[in-house]
Image (spheres, helix red, strand yellow):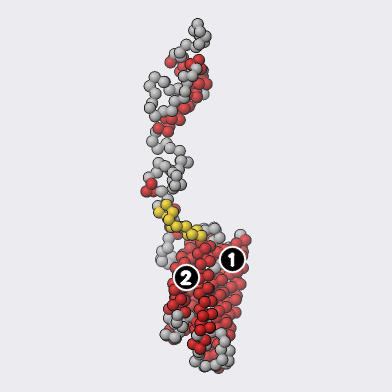
Amino acid sequence: MDATVDGRVPPDDPARTATSAPPNCPHRPQEQHHPQPHQQQWNLTTDNAHASLPGAIQRKSRSNDRSKERAEPGLEPADHYGDDGGGPRGRDSSEKLVVHLIIGFRDICVFTLVLPLGTLFVCFVSAYVFQPEEIHETHCRVYNIIPSISAITGVSPQRYLWRVSIALHIGPRFIIAFVYRNWYRAMVAGLNDPARVTKACRMINIVYWLNLVEISALCGVTYISNKENYPLHEKVFIIFMTTSLSYMLATLKLLKILQPDGPQTPNEESSLRYKQAFFALSIASTVGLILFFLKHRFLCQDLAFSWFALCEYIVASANMGFHCTTMLDFPTEHFLIAKNAKQYKKQQTSLGWKVD
């Protein structure tokens, strides 16, 4: 390399500079005579003696190449996101995911349990203290100490409190029914036996519609009081009891089909165990409920209606407990209301009413 009198290296010749780049360099260095206004330039004016070194040329070339890539449209790194976390900065703001509301699914399940259970307790205490004669009245006019659920929720003003409670309670129940159907369908994808898949799909539809009929019957029992229309109230109550027990049994049968090897997680194991316990308790209480109702209705025995009412409270509690095993089935899921979430929507998550 030639040097001048003062020891400094003369300015690089463009031809020599081009040939001084390492053979393995993927890009040729850019000439500095016509720099692009958007390119990032390294400060090489401090010591002109280093400008002709291969290392300096290679570093400058890489910098220019990176700047060139950044300047080209559509090559923005995918990990650059906006301040709101909604997506890449280059993406249109109208396509970003905007979350308006997110609620833990476990919290929804707790709400569906606490609301009717707490309201039932308030109705029982207030009616027992302030309206004992009305709630203990029966057609046999025998001695009675425990009023039925229909009695304490059929007097005023308790009936209005109970109806408001059920109205707020029904909405989440329908949502839970939809979620369970989609959850069961996702579990079917893990089955390999075609016969088992067909059977599971059939049971999913049965469980789904039994759940909807049960919720609808609960509305009917609530808004058709025994004091306003006893024959219709009695028939709707029978429908509620029948569909409730059938739903529990069908759910246990479906889980046995979907989990041929048994539960795979501790939550699934606990959920199945509680479901079985609440179903057994419901069956035993229903047998006692029917027995004591017949004794009261046809024999008019003392305290028969009280035993009937006690069995009714146990049935209602077991029913609530069975449905609240949802907290174990969906411990970490969330209910989400968001904008521009269409790309996350799948066909199996639709809320259609079509029977497959």
Q: Quadrant of the C terminus?
A: bottom left
| Badge 2 element | helix
Q: Where residue 171 appears, x then y in whole percent?
A: 44, 68
**Can see residue 45?**
yes
Amino acid type of the residue tagged 2 in the rendering: His
- Relative to 98, residue 2 above or below: above
Q: Are marks 2 and 1 in contact (CB under 8 Å)?
A: no
Mark nearest the camera among 2 and 1 is 2
**Can see residue 291?**
no
Front residue of 203/251: it is 251
Residue at 53 percent of width and 73 percent of height: 117
Number of numbered tags placed on the structure image: 2
Q: Which residue is mark 2?
A: 169
Q: Earlier in the sequence, mark 2 or mark 1?
A: 2
- Relative to 130, residue 338 above or below: above
Front residue of 126/61: it is 126
Amino acid type of the residue tagged 1 in the rendering: Ser
